[in-house]
Image (cartoon, rainbow, N blue to C red):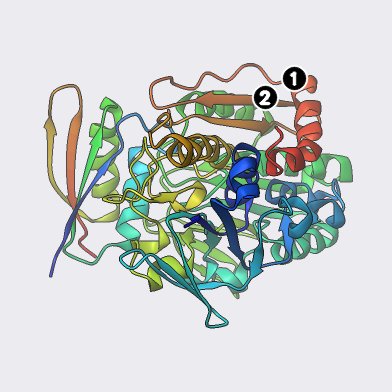
Amino acid sequence: MSERQTIDARGAFCPGPLMELIAAIKLAEIGDEIEILSADKGSAEDIPAWIAKVGHEMVGVTEMDGHWSIVVKKAK
Amino acid sequence: MAKRILIVGGGLSGTIVANGLVRQLGNELRSGSVNITMIGTSDQHMYQPGLLYLPFGRIREHELFRSQRKVLDRRVPYHIDPATNIDTENSTVTTASGKTFGYDYLVIATGSRIMPQSIPGMEEGGHWFYDLDGARKLRGALDDFKGGKVIVNVNAPHKCPVAPLEVTFMLREYFEAKGILDKCEITYTYPIGRLHALEPVAHWALPEFEKYGIKYETFFNTKEVDPKGKKISSEEGVTLDYDLLITIPPHNGAEVIEQSNLGKGGWVPTQKETLLQEGSTNVFVVGDTTNIPISKAGSTAHFEADTIIDNLTSLVKEGRWARNYDGKVFCFVETGLSTGTYVWFNYTTPPNPGPPSQMIHWFKLAYNRLYWLSARGLL
């Protein structure tokens, strides 16, 4: 059964939201969703760009109160 | 009845916690109202950052090691008996020899390990310096290297976030000193879209790479290595040829964490300010073992350990919480074989590294010795 996990990477300067996502995707099963919370606007652009490059699925990017919620699904 | 503090893991963070607690709880240890026990896997304590220097002949192997029994305060019984199951519901830890240890407070400090075997071909085709055997093999490969394409390949997640950049700059100087730099092409690959996770470090590194002609490939997450064809390919669809592949393999946490169902990948879900296992009031997690989105580095382990010492001491002596961890990380950055800089940050302060200097490099060399005072809880 698919799972959804949230990584709160707000205030994480190193390794940062995208690196956390890459590490989490390695441990996830196909179909699992991962939500990354990031205070860094750059992540809202970098993460969808990387997801498109490697062929996972973007579920959505939402601007919240002072941070972004980026949800992706492991596709392969 | 005595309060039992059990520490699983004899690396830097577990050792600092143990030695620091002994200094704070000397009276309680003497009276028998507290006891502190450590379970580890080795009689040797290794200074892991020293491995960076080994392939370049800049540190001797014996300088990396001390007897764990001597590093650890004599008032802490040390069992070289790897933990095989950590049962936080029943507050017990079982070991390879079949012993069971109970606890009132548990500190999980089981660390991380490299996983080259998780990427096809990496074990056969790659060199690394993140363990002693790998660093020795890389030293041999560098001794024999006459020139060609060198790839420094970084994978996520990994500990010591600046080591890949450090080794790249050190390699360039090493080849220059050996007189083969004109026959070498260095390419650095990184998982995200810049040269380092820390944006200011990435901004500093880019002109340095350009100045020295170091090539780079960002958004490169290794899919496989072809050891026969000497090629490395990424999930992003890029394939590079190499003559010498130096990889920073992806890491996992300790096997016992996964075996005990305490966390996927061996990383224990941990509250980022209290350093308590999520949902727990008596299980602390320290160093690489946590799943906190923060650098896996010796300084992180050190600053977390200091927080845990204060809180465990305060809980035992006064029944109250002392303070939260602020996310502090401090890293030296070697920018070659004779210059260095440093960077620090916490959950609210962004990093802002200064210009490299020879003095900071010397300070790092001094810290290579001072480490043993840190592990003893004196620095």
* Mark 1 vs 2, N-terminal side: 2
**Quick one: B12 or B181, which is closer to the camera?**
B12
The residue that mark 1 highlights is: B357
Q: Which amino acid does label 1 sit on?
A: Ser
Looking at the image, can residue B367 be seen?
yes
Judging from the image, mark 2 belongs to the subunit labelled: B
**Quick one: B238 or B26, which is closer to the camera?**
B26
Q: What residue type is labelled 2?
A: Thr
Instruction: Choose top left, top right, bottom left or bottom right for residue B69.
Output: bottom right
Of all residues, the one furthest to the bottom in this rendering is: B98
The residue that mark 2 highlights is: B341
Q: Are marks 1 and 2 in contact (CB under 8 Å)?
A: yes
Q: Which residue is drawn at 52% across and 62% down?
A: B232
- Mark on residue B148? none
Q: Where is residue B29 in the image (x, y as percent from the top left)?
A: 62, 49
Q: Where is residue A52 in the image (x, y as percent from the top left)?
A: 23, 48
**Quick one: B360 or B339, which is closer to the camera?**
B360
